[in-house]
């Protein structure tokens, strides 16, 4: 038995402990959505951690729902890993599970995005992205109303 074989398990265990201590800690992400005109239905939130997820080519990081209330509602995503994210929300007034639009694609229900971009189209991931670090993060989204 060599000296190397005696110390190898201890060295590997020490490295594993160090790696765990340096790993990023998850944080809570609290989203406040304001501009709700009524208390109908549910506010639906989608947290995307990549451009592919934002463009519906990959799975969302997390989804959330909260009962609508006149004025504003809040929802907290727990244990979000540090990284770059984008948020999309809408008020599903009739609880259909999808954003209702007219023939021209203009939303009939309130909708919004992180960073509240002023665009007349679906914003890009770069326009909505924000960072979650190791501390708790808050985001405010103002609902827009189409028709």
Image: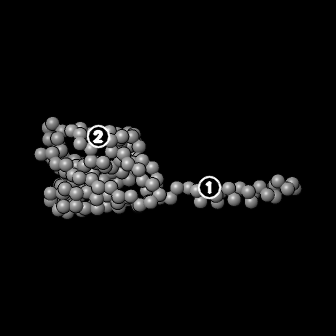
Question: Secondary structure under badge 2?
Answer: loop
Q: Position of 12 compared to 139: left or right?
A: right
Give the residue number, with chain letter if any, for mark 2: 123
Q: Please report contact status of discs 2 and 1: CB closer than 8 Å, yes or no.
A: no
In the rendered image, the residue lying farthest to the right is 1
Report x, y in % for residue 31.
Answer: 32, 58
Q: Give me the residue at 27% from left, 53% from top.
A: 141
Answer above or below: position of 22 versus 127. Answer: below
Q: Give me the residue at 12% from left, 45% from top.
A: 147
Report x, y in % for residue 119.
Answer: 23, 40
Report x, y in % for residue 55.
Answer: 34, 39
The reply to whether residue 44 is in sight is no
* Image coloring type: one colour
Between the residue at mark 2 and the residue at mark 1, the CA separation in whole angstroms equals 37 Å
Q: Which quadrant of the figure contains the N terminus? A: bottom right
Report x, y in % for residue 134.
Answer: 47, 57
Q: Give me the residue at 31% from left, 49% from top.
A: 114
Query: On the image, which quarter does residue 37 sit in?
Result: bottom left
Give the residue number, with chain letter if any, for mark 1: 19
Q: Which numbered disc flags the more N-terminal residue, 2 or 1?
A: 1
Mark 2 neighbour class, 10 Å CA radius: few under 14, some 14 to 19, many 20 or more: some
Answer above or below: position of 120 versus 98. Answer: above
The reply to whether residue 87 is in sight is yes
């Amino acid at each position: 038995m060599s000296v190397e074989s005696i110390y190898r398990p201890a060295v590997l265990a020490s490295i594993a402990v160090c790696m765990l201590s340096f790993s990023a800690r998850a944080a809570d992400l609290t989203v406040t959505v304001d501009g709700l005109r009524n208390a109908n239905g549910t506010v639906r939130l989608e947290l995307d951690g990549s451009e592919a997820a934002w463009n519906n080519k990959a799975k969302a990081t997390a989804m959330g729902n909260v009962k609508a209330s006149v004025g504003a509602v809040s929802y907290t995503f727990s244990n979000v890993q540090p990284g770059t994210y984008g948020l999309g929300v809408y008020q599903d007034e009739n609880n259909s599970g999808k954003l209702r639009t007219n023939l021209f694609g203009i939303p009939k229900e309130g909708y919004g995005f992180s960073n509240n971009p002023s665009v007349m189209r679906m914003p890009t991931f770069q326009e909505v992205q924000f960072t979650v670090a190791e501390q708790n993060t808050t985001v405010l989204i103002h609902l827009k109303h189409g028709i």
